[in-house]
Amino acid sequence: MYPRIRDLREDADLSQSQIAKLLCCSQQVYSNYERGQRDVPTFILIRLAQLHHTTTDYLLGLTDCREIPAEWNK
């Protein structure tokens, strides 16, 4: 999961500080999430999926499909 949240952030051209601000946490806390030094709380995981328009399954490595399934948008 940790490399994926870093890769998504970098793909969006956002800094750790910018993401941390959107998540209402410090840059250091967010950095720890990216490095796998701190478990990502469920509410942060959900917010990251929303921010990056993906699923929590993708963030957790349960699927390699980054897109939200079309049937979820019905």
Image (spheres, helix red, strand yellow):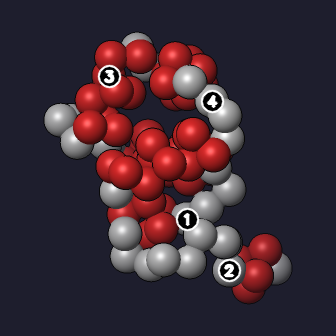
Sequence order check, earlier mark of 1 and 2: 1
For badge 2, the amino acid type reads Pro
What is the spatial separation of the Cα atoms under label 3 and label 1, in whole angstroms?
A: 22 Å
Which residue position holds label 2?
A: 69
Q: Quadrant of the C terminus?
A: bottom right
* Residue 24 makes an appearance in the image: no
Tag 3's secondary structure? Answer: helix
What is the spatial separation of the Cα atoms under label 1 and label 4, in whole angstroms?
A: 19 Å
Q: Quadrant of the N terminus?
A: bottom left
What is the spatial separation of the Cα atoms under label 1 and label 2, in whole angstroms?
A: 9 Å
- Mark 3–mark 4 CB contact (< 8 Å): no
Q: Which mark is residue 29?
A: 3
Find the residue positioned furthest to the bottom: 71
For badge 1, the amino acid type reads Thr
Which residue position holds label 4?
A: 14
- Which-is-in-front pick, marks 3 and 4? 4
What is the spatial separation of the Cα atoms under label 2 and label 3, in whole angstroms?
A: 30 Å
Q: Is residue 40 above or below residue 67?
A: above
- Mark 1–mark 2 CB contact (< 8 Å): yes
For badge 3, the amino acid type reads Val
* Residue 9 makes an appearance in the image: yes
- Which-is-in-front pick, marks 1 and 4? 4
Tell me the crowding category of disc 3: few under 14, some 14 to 19, or many 20 or more residues within 10 angstroms, Cα based.
some
What is the spatial separation of the Cα atoms under label 3 and label 4, in whole angstroms?
A: 16 Å
Sequence order check, earlier mark of 1 and 4: 4
Q: Is residue 20 above or below residue 46?
A: above
Q: Is residue 19 above or below residue 6?
A: above
Which residue position holds label 1?
A: 55
Q: Is residue 24 above or below residue 6?
A: above
